[in-house]
Amino acid sequence: MERLGRCQVLIVLLVILTIEIDESEEVSAVVEDRNGDSTTTTTVNVDNPTDCDKVFHIIVTGSGLFNYVIATGNIGSVFTTAVDTDSGDEKLQCNMATIRTNAIASYSLSITVTDTGDSSTATTTVTVTVENLVIPSAECDHVPSVLNGSIVGGDQSPYVEGQNVTYNCTSGYTINGTTTISCNGSGVWSETPSCLKDCDSVPSVLNAEIVGGNLSSYVEGHTLTYSCTNGFTMMGTPTITCDATGAWTVPPSCQKDIGSACSSDAECQNNLHTPPYVCDNTVCKFGVGGRNCTVLTNSCLTNGRCTSDACECVDGFDPVDNKCYELILQSPNNGSRIEICETTEINEVIANLSASFAPTSTDFVFNISDPSNNFAIADDTIMVVSDLDVDVESPVTSYVFIIELSHPNSSRTASSTITIRVEDDNDNAPEFSSDSYTFDISEQSTASTTVGMIAATDKDSTSPNNMIANYTVIGTNEFEITSDGVLRVSSGASFNYTTTPLYTFFIMAMDGALEDVELSTNVPVTVNIIPVTKTTTKTPSTSPPIETKTHASTSEKDAYIGGGVGAALVLIIVIIVIVVIVCVRRGERADDENRCLTDVSGQYKSTLPLVDIQAKEGQENSDIDDPNNLNDIRATEIHQNDSPLSETETQTKEDHESSDNDNHKSLNDIRDIEMHQNDSPLSETETQTKEDHESSDNDGHKSLNDIRAIEIHHESPLSEAEIQENENHGYSKLELATSL
């Protein structure tokens, strides 16, 4: 019991030690400004560089080594952490030069503190406001020049935000837009005006009026439309335009309607046209004035007819050969369809114009009626005058316009309706959604692990030009990309942060155009390999770098337990379990020893009545008859006092034990036998019965093995000579004690 008590004390001490060790605090962090005030906001003054020496104190409670990480908000790595030599705590400091370069008035920083021993963390967010920061505005480039204009006022170079310049146009030009432009904060000038040529006087057309009224002045690009009064038919194009030289295009004319009433030839004539008109029987007709068909026998051939005394021409009269001729627009024919590419350049000719009238006629006039203003006529040709890009949100791929032909000697015009079909060219390469891509993956990433999504589009309007046919990885075999832009780890790839912390390569996107005209675009990609366990992290990415520093806290410097607290707790628990097991086993052995005490001196009195002893002997006799050995005799106590055996009984037992030796057999595995005798509890008859029983034990050829924990306390029930004689016969003290 004394040993068990000592074990209990040891267990209690170990438990107390475990509790004390387990009371290590989880990491926590608070911040104070440079003045020692507990706050998460502070300022730095750009005029006081010493403000950057100590922006915040980071006070950490807990034990172990700590990592300090500025996780977010550290733009340009302007902030770092270091040990404050005065207090021993960590401090947040800054770089004033970088603050001025960043030109950012406020920073919100997230600082994470990690205990390297138990990986517990604490995060705090602080705000740093920059005072007296001068944020320079971007300068504008040189002042835009204006054709036929000049700068007449405003600020001087260099130009910064808010400065202005003023323009004026030279004589004969009118400004279009605002006369003053300004430089904005992004270094860009506002929209520049233009100087447009003033137009000549508006042409006057007899028997016509201007639709919408007449303005006091016009500039290049303006158009006017005429409308003939009643009784007159318009000849020519109703709309005229002022060109870049200020001249108007040819105006129309309004002629007296054929068949209208007249009283003289003068009423049927128009000074603007060469063909003669005659008043024939009070009706206006085409023909040669004053001359009849009988005189001009050939004047009404082909396209004329003789009426009364005049030759009336259907289309017109040619004064050179005195004949009527038909005005024909030969090319392009009416209903023609012309196909061109969207990449057709401005001023490129897409069709030639041709016409016929009299054999010697050359003064044909071609006009175009194009609502889109994308096409024009020059030198008897049709040309493109604006961009025909169909790769827009609402593309136009078909244009319809009218070509009108006129001649000074013709009384009518000819026209053709033309359709222009614009075909989509593969003139746009694929475009990625970002100029570059950066991804982070674990160094334990395996094949088919998704790294990220990379997407490209094509602005071409029709398929297959606007399709992305495939993506290709260029510069590495560690990664692959699917047809829909999923970047992933290649089969067989493996990563090691120590040897290769990042991979830089390109992704190429190819459009689906036909071979030899397909287009492609490359975009740079960076993949950062993140280590499984890291204490110092420097991530080369587009996000602000994360700075990690490791050192001990102030409390740790006074009493450092270390990061192995968890391992120590496990070891102590194992020791406690072992101690408990050992103590229990020792307690069992102590009980066995107490039961096995064989104090024959009579320190203990017999506790069993005679009947119980006899019953036990009967049980033992039954055990001897069993063919199995009796093993593991434990905790046998023989307590004798005051010479329990008489001289006759002693002699009888010696004879019995001598018989045991002759048979060379032993009794095994006798357990838990206690013989308590006092004042000769057995009679002479009972003693004789027991001796016969023990003799029967020897006849059973059993051996005595594994006798443990037996102590014989003897006070000379036998003489020295008797003990020696028994030992000479091979009896051990244990056998003597058992027989006694």
Image (tube, helix red, strand yellow):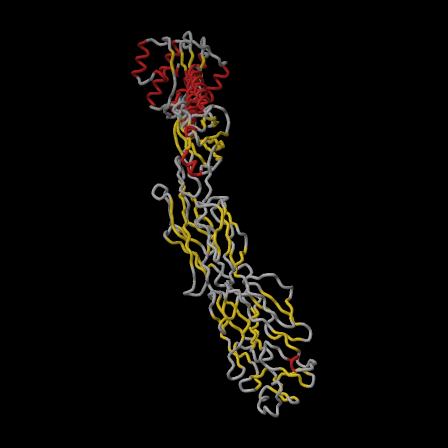
Residue 560 position (above or below residue 380): above
For this view, does 390 lie left or right of residue 516?
Answer: right
Q: x%, y% of residue 151?
A: 48, 51
Q: x%, y% of residue 42?
A: 49, 29
Q: x%, y% of residue 383?
A: 49, 69
Image label count: 0
Q: Quadrant of residue 304?
A: bottom right
User: Which residue corresponds to the image point at 44% horizontal and 65% vertical from the top-left?
Assistant: 514
The extreme left residue here reads 728
Q: Quadrant of residue 80?
A: top left
Looking at the figure, which quarter contains the C terminus?
top left
Name the foreground residue: 561 vs 710: 561
Name the foreground residue: 707 vs 55: 55
User: Which residue corresponds to the image point at 50% horizontal and 52% vertical from the top-left?
Assistant: 167
Name the foreground residue: 736 vs 631: 631
Q: x%, y% of residue 149?
A: 48, 55
For this view, does 652 lie left or right of residue 379?
Answer: left
- Is residue 670 something one can see in this rendering? no
Residue 534 position (above or below residue 514): above
Q: Quadrant of residue 568?
A: top left
For this view, does 290 lie left or right of residue 532?
Answer: right
Looking at the figure, which quarter contains the N terminus?
top left
- Is residue 488 something one can see in this rendering? yes
Name the foreground residue: 117 vs 379: 379
